[in-house]
Image (spheres, rainbow, N blue to C red):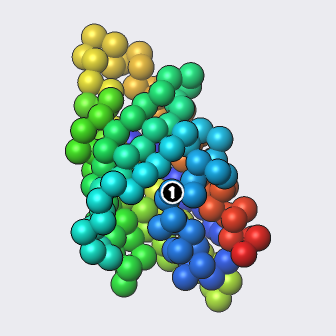
Amino acid sequence: MVKLDQVIQAPIDEVWEILLDIESYPREMEHVRSVEIVEQFDGRQRRAAWSVLLKGSILEWLEEERIDSDNYAIEFRQLSGDLEHFDGHWALEASGERETTAVFEVLFEIGIPPLAEMLNPVAQRSLRENCAEMLRGIEQRSSLD
């Protein structure tokens, strides 16, 4: 499991809008190769195709996202893709008028049993670095808006 949190110096509504704009991530985040919303059911559910660079390897997956705008939260789970298991959530909490705490948590499993003991810690470190980059990208973008 990877869990990160970061305080962002911006109002929660501004951070929320940036967080939801996943198709802009590749322009601002080096390790995100592409993100495409492939299905939008309503304002509360969508499917997105992701391609990211993780420690020199390209990982791709299709995920389902459940969006809870009232509570500033997104739950996601992989429907298909390169990992055996990949799901988690984003949550935002106002820590002040112009301060938001963003929390990202993901559970994953590579799915190669003989190599899992060796690969999972490497993937976990890389995923942590990529997620930290995503949080920095959100923070940088919020400071520009």
Spot occupied by residue 93 in the image (x, y as percentages of width and height): 50, 76
Give me the residue at 25% from left, 69% from top.
41
Picture layout, residue 90 above or below residue 72: above
In which quadrant will I find the N terminus?
Answer: top left
Q: Residue furthest right?
A: 144
Give me the residue at 63% from left, 67% from top.
7
Q: Is mark 1 on a helix, strand or loop?
A: helix
Q: Mark 1 points at which residue?
A: 23
Give me the residue at 56% from left, 22% from top.
56
Mark 1 crowd level (few <14, some 14–19, many ≥20, 10 Å Cα): some
Spot occupied by residue 23 in the image (x, y as percentages of width and height): 51, 57
Picture layout, residue 92 above or below residue 57: below
- Check disc 1 and give the amino acid type: Glu
- Depth order, front residue of 111/37: 37
Spot occupied by residue 117 in the image (x, y as percentages of width and height): 36, 18
Relative side of 64 to 129, left or right: left
